[in-house]
Amino acid sequence: MTTNLGFSTSVDFLEKLKNQTATAHKKLESLPVSASILSPNMEMDDYYHYLSLMYDVHSSTQKVVFPLLADLIPDLKEREKTPLIMDDLSYLNYKTGKTTPVFTKSNISIPFALGILYVVEGSTLGGRFILKNLETIPGLDQQKGVAYFSGYGNKTGSYWKNFLNILTSYQEEHHNEDEIIGGAVYAFECIYNHFLNPVINEN
């Protein structure tokens, strides 16, 4: 009985988290740079632009969020995405410029950081969907240059479930769903602003 109650509480929390970030999520997906990656006519420059923006997002995540969650999430090192993006850019003969900080809020708490990571890790699930389009693009159709969007491969689902288990367990123990949701909304807003007004860095 206790287990079922815990499961129900977790489902309710995740549903609330999803619902309260839905508007920000759709707003981000509506941007031209987001739509370009799903276009059957995507150009390589569009792909480079998207990867470079996401490099900033993941670099900022690894610098700001990861240290706060190191004791909570045991496989953080395996969740680093910047090496994958660098491999893709190298294959495309592009270089990364100076990174632009995306998450700049000071004094981020652990639950707020979990909210940010919820958004960033969730993008890996979406990446598997985007991958289907990328593999139709000449130059990317040989499973090269798509390491980032390949995510965790056939382990993508299990990595996501493991993260959600940690997230819901933490929320059940500390009762800070509003702070977690606040972090997730903040993440979507920061990524939206970064996509909307990217800082162009020289290589």
Image (cartoon, helix red, strand yellow):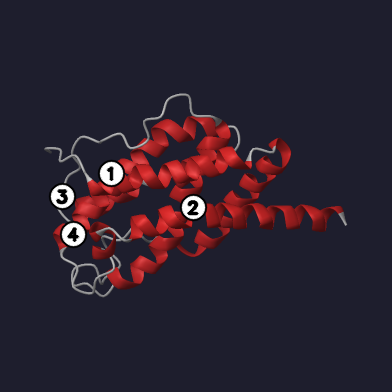
Q: Which residue is mark 4?
A: 46
- Could you tell me if the residues under marks 2 and 3 are in contact, i.e. CB atoms within 8 Å? no
Label 3 crowd (10 A; few <14 / some 14-19 / many >=20): some
Whether 11 is drawn above or below 54: the answer is below
Residue 126 in the image, given as x and y percentages of width and height? 42, 62
* Residue in the image at 33% along x and 37% along y: 102
For the residues marked 4 and 2, what is the alpha-carbon distance in whole angstroms? 26 Å
| Residue 31, position as x, y percentages in the image | 27, 58
Q: Which residue is mark 3?
A: 94
Q: Nearer the viewer, mark 2 or mark 1?
A: 2
In the rendered structure, which disc, 1 or 3, sits on the residue that comes first in sequence? 3
Q: Secondary structure at mark 3?
A: loop
Spatial distance from mark 2 to mark 3, Cα to Cα?
33 Å
Report if residue 117 is visible in the image: yes
Q: Nearer the viewer, mark 4 or mark 3?
A: 4
Element on which disc 4 rests: helix
Between label 2 and label 3, give the one nearer the viewer. Answer: 2
The disc labelled 1 sits on which kind of residue? His
* Circles 4 and 3: CB atoms closer than 8 Å: no
- Identify residue for label 2: 21
**Residue 69 left/right relative to 31:** right
Query: What is the quadrant of residue 172 in the picture?
Result: top right
Whether the residues at callouts 2 and 1 have beta carbons within 8 Å, the answer is no
